[in-house]
Image: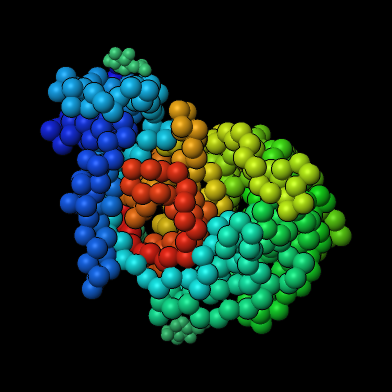
Amino acid sequence: MRIVRQTQKSSPKSKLVILISFVGLLGAALIVDLLWASSSSTSSALRYVTGNWPIGPSSTIIIIPSVDVPASLDKDNAKDRGKDNATARFLSATFADLPAPELHWQKMSSAPVPRLDGAAIQIKNLLYVFAGYGTINLVHSHVDVYNFTDNTWGARFDMPKEMAHSHLGMVTDGRYIYVVTGQYGPQCRGPTARTFVLDTETKQWSDLLPLPVPRYAPATQLWRGRLHVMGGSGINRYTPEVEHWSLAVKDGKPLEKEWRSEIPIPRGGPHRACVVADDKLMVIGGQEGDFMAKPGSPIFKCSRRNEVVYDNVFMLDDEMKWKNLPPMPKPDSHIEFAWALVNNSIVIAGGTTEKHPITKKMVLVGEIFRFDLNTLKWSVIGKLPYRVKTTLVGFWDGWLYFTSGQRDKGPDDPSPRKVIGEMWRTKLRF
Ligand SMILES: *[C@@H]1O[C@H](CO)[C@@H](O)[C@H](O)[C@H]1NC(C)=O
Ligand SMILES: *[C@@H]1O[C@H](CO)[C@@H](O)[C@H](O)[C@H]1NC(C)=O
Ligand SMILES: *[C@@H]1O[C@H](CO)[C@@H](O)[C@H](O)[C@H]1NC(C)=O
């Protein structure tokens, strides 16, 4: 059985795409590598890359829970099949790469340090990049600032010592950056409820009311004069929490003495994009569960647990009741700072999707998704130079930028490897 969903008529190219994806999925890495090598150019002068993907550009979207194997291919790859037979049968669009238009990427100067689970806020032409893991045993406690006007990394300044180093909730009103809760320390250490405000004009930090209880990576936004914090993981780093609080704030100061309880979010968990647009609050993607500290480990060593990644989009409006909006093209998590608002569309870059059902390995996302707020329709508008999670995104003067995160092992292996500080940009045109 083959399910092929097409946006254009089947063409020789789309058949080739099916073959290539099948071959690639069977682990015929050599063939894929050759294809990759022949279709990519890394001109050092221009530092552009193209076609860095095993599956070529196409507007055809293919979902392959199972594939009819052409006889010739079957024979050619007989020795590769064996235990991998099942692989192709179970593959679905959830973790297979979705074909997308080709984008040309330009490599800019890398951030001073690599970052996983960092945070970022754009204010006009500046991208403030915070915290994050450099390695699993080393966390950053400073801010680097990228200037989109002259494309350089400039200012660097320290965060307060008591501020969390990853899994932060963060949002800005255009001058003040509100920094809420998060994980304190490396590996899988516990969270803090401490909350801070940065005045980006004076670079001064101040304390804000701590959250009632600590959270990992809660969805955080400013909406109608209130700082909203919802979801995230509980203090064990794993349990998806649905609680939702808000606090009236103005110019970096609380206007109230305590957080107000708000309507809980229908599905809990960390690592979601949280966006306010058209005076609506939206919470996109995310997951239930996360790595936890190994019981008794003195260094809080991270150990993997089951995770469920989801595609839900929830929205709050005047009625203050959560509504469902159309789901993402695939489940996506680790996207809290991987989005930008462009011409009344939300653009989301990369992330993680559901684990591979056979290898159980984590699967990173390389697509760029667009949610058009006029039509409430999702589309895949391009691909990143590689799959990457917890990437930090900005948009300036027609260019979509991303930096940092953890990238894949290569075009034919979507599981995570290197923590990066690279900065890339591409011209965006819907
Ligand atoms: C793989 O497929 C071949 C040919 O269809 C079949 O003979 C073989 O039993 C399968 N192997 C497994 C492990 O399913
Ligand atoms: C950003 O770069 C522009 C152009 O070089 C410069 O005029 C501006 O002062 C820079 N901004 C900051 C905050 O450094
Ligand atoms: C957004 O709209 C402006 C004005 O219509 C247009 O010039 C620009 O190309 C659009 N941006 C994208 C990403 O399509």
- Please tell me which residue is depicted at 66% across the width and 34% down the height of the picture: 266
Outermost residue, left side? 12
Instruction: Work out whether 196 lies above or below 419.
Output: below
Horizontally, residue 407 falls left or right of residue 292, namely left
x%, y% of residue 254? 79, 64
- Please tell me which residue is depicted at 30% across the width and 24% down the height of the picture: 81
- Which image quarter: residue 108? bottom left
Instruction: Work out whether 324 lies above or below 420.
Output: above
x%, y% of residue 89? 36, 21
Foreground: 138 or 281?
138
Horizontally, residue 286 falls left or right of residue 227, namely left
Outermost residue, front side? 79
Total count of labels? 0
Horizontally, residue 91 falls left or right of residue 68, namely right
Location of the N terminus by quadrant is: top left
x%, y% of residue 304? 62, 40
Q: Is residue 209 visible?
A: yes
Question: In which of the image's four quarters is ligand 3 placed?
Answer: bottom left
Foreground: 162 or 27?
27
x%, y% of residue 260? 81, 50
- Please tell me which residue is depicted at 63% across the width and 78% down the height of the picture: 157
